[in-house]
Image (cartoon, rainbow, N blue to C red):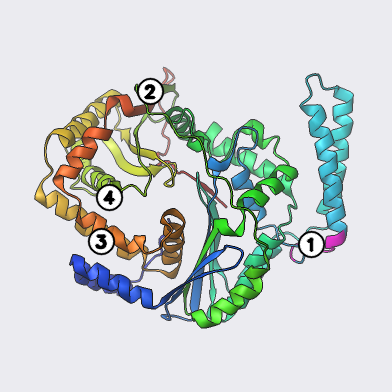
Amino acid sequence: MISATRTLAATLAVALCLAAALAAPLAAQDLASFEQKTTIHTLDNGWTFIIVERPVAPVFSFATIVNVGSAQEVPGITGLAHMFEHMAFKGTPSIGTSDYPAEKEALDRLETAYQAYQKERLAPHPDAETLEALHKAFEERQQEADGYVVHNEFDRLLEQQGAVGVNAFTGADITAYLYSLPANKLELFAYLESERFLHPVFREFYKERAVVQEERRLRMESNPIGRMIEQFQTSAYMAHPYGIPTVGYMSDLQSITITDAKRFFDTYYAPSNLTTAVVGDVKAETVIPILEKYFGRIPRRPDPSPLRTVEPTQTAERTVVIEDPSQPFYIEGYHKPAITDPDQAVYDAIDDLLTNGRTSRLYRRLVRDEQLAVQVQSFSGYPGNKYPNLWAILAVPAPGVTNDQVAAVIHEELEQLRTEDVTDAELERFKTRARADLIRELDSNQGMAIQLADYQRLFGDWRELFRTIQHIDMVTKEDIRRVATETLLASNRTVVQIVNTPAGATDAPATAPTAGTSR
């Protein structure tokens, strides 16, 4: 998620709020108070809006969460969720073009030319001369269509109207669009956001596809850590589409078409599959008619079909070793339930106990005391939260230290979680930090909008965001031992590591894996 930089005054205010929030009964009171300034409105087409009146400053933020990501892709079209995120910034029939009727005809000719080229390219025995002629015709049609494009007009228009934080990201089961505007630009927001989902224009598709291919080369194929994370994801998932990298496979990125993208949009961008939160200096009674006027234009479409594939239970450890002249790196993961499972707060507790802060167990042992690693981090929800996912832990060994040495310490600490209760002090530190983290996430309009829309998507009720405090307060020592015993088993483990080749190591920055891509 995205966090905002806070001023000292705001930080002090949060600290005061935290002090008041330490009592569990107050969480319910806070929710009741928040409900009074929050309105849920669902259009006839199924699009759900959460409106939060927060008149702290004359601005508002929004987040539109689309219930789609790479998990909705199949072989042959991987990377399409991310590609449409890029397309959503290319404009509309009235934005980004000098002559849309002529451009539309040019785009139709472009797609016809590309389909002919691709049919020959993918034929069992393509004819070289025919292929060259078809590719030349495609390039000519692309140049013709490009002649009508007004580049970056959508972004430029927003910036001229005072928008900040214009961005989007795609993950394994989510696509999000967000920015902030002055409060008097509410109708502009409604027009622009509804227009790009009512009349998307797939201009510059094949050029943007080449950009995404380069993104894959840089992030995955030319980056040892990127290659490792891709191996981790594809090794952990044998059946479920969580095993598909969000950026897509290169062969698919060389083959997906405008036709594919239109079909994907029509299927997964049904209004009922979208949730938008609007937070800031707004009034629900003013906002709702504007939402009806603009977003209500979008026709209802069938709800997308749910995923059918369930990942089979893992019964044996999977290990991948990548030899590379780079910084050694170690990651292991364990299958766990979706975020909606009642034990999610227990996994959060395990994360906190092991790697959150300088007093956490693995930081003390690996980094501070034994100096076996320069970095250690655990996390859940990879590569997504909606479906059963992975709890994982990664570490960067210190110079001269092997991955095996690091793994031995990790497994000792996991065994201790299975066999011994955590201390009262550790459990209380987790609960205090978790409450503080929630307050920080809700400190900005943008952060609040993202969280509310996402919880509405995942749980069907934004109120679950506030109920997380109750779930956290209910975590016991017995819960931690039980979950560790059930989940942190060798037979449920996937391990991927980078090991130096004889050529020797080179300095390479180590970064935690990301489950999504953004603009």
Residue identified by numbered label 2: 318
Neighbour tally class for label 3: few under 14, some 14-19, many 20 plus, Cα within 10 Å = many
The answer to whether 351 appears left or right of 175 in the picture is left
Q: How far apart in space, not on screen, are marks 3 and 4 (Cα)?
A: 12 Å
Neighbour tally class for label 4: few under 14, some 14-19, many 20 plus, Cα within 10 Å = many
Locate the N terminus by quadrant.
Answer: bottom left
Amino acid bearing label 2: Arg
Residue 185 position, x and y percent, is 59, 78
Amino acid bearing label 1: Thr
Residue 312 location, quadrant: top left
Neighbour tally class for label 2: few under 14, some 14-19, many 20 plus, Cα within 10 Å = some
Magenta part of the protein: which range?
95-101
**Chain-order first, disc 1 or disc 2:** 1
Residue identified by numbered label 1: 97
Residue identified by numbered label 3: 435
Instruction: Give the SS element for disc 1.
Output: loop
Residue 469 position, x and y percent, is 26, 60
